Image (spheres, rainbow, N blue to C red):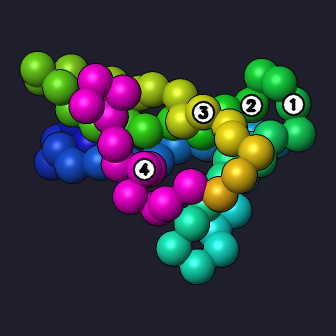
Amino acid sequence: IEKVGGHGIAIDDNCAIEFIGERFRVLAARKSAHAYRVYKKDGQVVSEVIPQEKGLLPVANLYRRAEQ
């Protein structure tokens, strides 16, 4: 991300992203485990937590920044 930009997804140990068709959800075995959006903003690499939801969300939400 730092060298070429774009978007990425990172996950902690004890965390996973489940995909069902064009939808997803974040699953974590521990409260401290999260999934993150990773992207470059103003020359800095930024990571933000992807919230855990009970229901399935559209895959497009994986790339939606909190600021949008």
In the image, the segment drawn in magenta is: 57-68
Residue sitting at x 47%, y 61%: 59
Mark sitting earlier along the chain (1/3)? 1
Distance from disc 2 to disc 3, alpha carbons, whole Å, reads 11 Å
For label 3, the crowd category at 10 Å Cα-Cα, with few meaning under 14, some 14 to 19 and many 20 or more, is few
Q: How many marks?
A: 4
Pointer 2 residue: 33
Q: Quadrant of residue 32?
A: top right
Distance from disc 2 to disc 4, alpha carbons, whole Å, reads 19 Å
Q: Nearer the viewer, residue 13 or 16?
A: 16
x%, y% of residue 23? 57, 66
Task: Decide if residue 63 is in sight here.
Answer: yes
The residue most toward the bottom is 21
Evaluate if marks 1 and 2 touch, with contact meaning CB atoms under 8 Å apart: yes
Residue sitting at x 76%, y 45%: 54
Distance from disc 3 to disc 4, alpha carbons, whole Å, reads 10 Å
